[in-house]
Amino acid sequence: MECVLYQERSGRAETVECGLEDEACRMVLKRLRGLGDGEFGWVRLVDPSEEELVQLAEELGLHPLAVEDAVQARQRPKKERFGEVLAIALKTLWYVEEEGAVETGEMMLFIGPRYVLTVRHGDMDPAAEAARRLDAEPSMLRFGPLSVLHAVLDVVVDAYGEAAETVRGALDRLEDRVFSSSRVDHTEEIYSLKREVREFRDAVQPLVPVLPGLLNGLGEQERPAKVIPYFRDVTDHLHRTDIEVRTLDELLNSVLDAQQARVGTWQNDDMRRISAWAAIFAIPTMVAGVYGMNFEHMPELGWRFGYPLAVCLMAVASGLLYRAFRRNGWL
């Protein structure tokens, strides 16, 4: 467990790292309960066990249902109110370009009167970048626990935007390959990228209706008027990312349709070529078949020029068909 105690006016931060069983941890949690105006604490947990969360919930007075959500780590983005505590579930997301995959994690935030508890599942750590931003701009600390909420949301939404740009680049490169002159079927790649975009949408879209009303229900002391523009800015960034993700999904549908149309065209071309060559070889086959029946009364069999004439007939007829098919684009 990592806990940071902030003083809002001075911007001073005191960081304590300890295990939940340590005496130092109990002292920190006791101090959190006694924090007054002008200071607040931020407790950070990474992949905690259920026992650890239950113990911490008892110390901070968290609702059992909130603890259950934090343990399961399979929540859609949402917000809930448990008495004085505001609980928010977020999906963390980043795009691994080398693997062509969208990786996701989850973070739960519990905003109390004088503390913030964040529970992270997954490799991405928005809390570290959020803490760095707060250290770089200590004036934000005047908003108390809401400053941490804003910083974490800002980091998560920025990561959405960066991932969307990377996915857009991958889609542009895929489009170039689909519409190139090479006859390569990219359907599997398109479906793979489409699946990643769908996962992207599952993280972004449920959060869109959550952010605008995030601060509703908080009192004026809990929700200072000056903090609202900061959350509105994060909401605008999220809306832009949501539009971009929807656009990516629609573009992938168009690229998939184009790829399937090209594959159909290739198949039609192949069938025309096969049919053309079959027609060309049908004439010699027919002539050879007629003269291969070996009937006794076939005058041409005894004619001196019968064989050369039959060969010339087959060659001329095949040549004329080949020329006709070439002219029509079948060969």
Image (cartoon, helix red, strand yellow):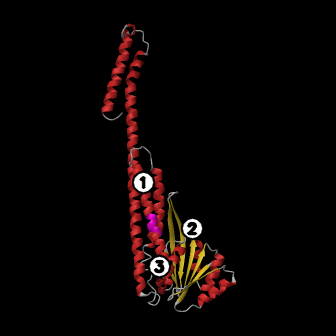
Residue indicated by mark 2: 123
**Spatial CA span between label 1 and label 2:** 27 Å
Q: Is residue 190 above or below residue 33?
A: above
Q: Is residue 318 left or right of residue 156?
A: left
| Mark 1 touches mark 2? (CB < 8 Å) | no
Q: Nearer the viewer, residue 4 or 306?
A: 4
The secondary structure making up most of the magenta span is helix
Residue indicated by mark 1: 173
Residue 313 picture location, percent across and down: 34, 18
Residue, x 33% and y 22% (percent of image)?
317
Q: Earlier in the sequence, mark 1 or mark 2?
A: 2
- Residue 162 is one of the magenta-drawn residues: yes
Q: Secondary structure at mark 1?
A: helix
Q: Is residue 53 above or below residue 196?
A: below
Q: Earlier in the sequence, mark 3 or mark 2?
A: 2
Q: Secondary structure at mark 3?
A: helix
Q: Amino acid at mark 3?
A: His
Q: Quadrant of the C terminus?
A: top left
Q: Secondary structure at mark 2?
A: loop
Residue 310 picture location, percent across and down: 37, 15
**Spatial CA span between label 1 and label 3:** 35 Å
Residue indicated by mark 3: 150
Residue, x 45% and y 89% (percent of image)?
219
- Residue 231 is one of the magenta-drawn residues: no
Q: Quick one: label 3, few (<14), some, or many (20+) residues within 10 Å? A: many
Q: What span is in magenta?
A: 159-164
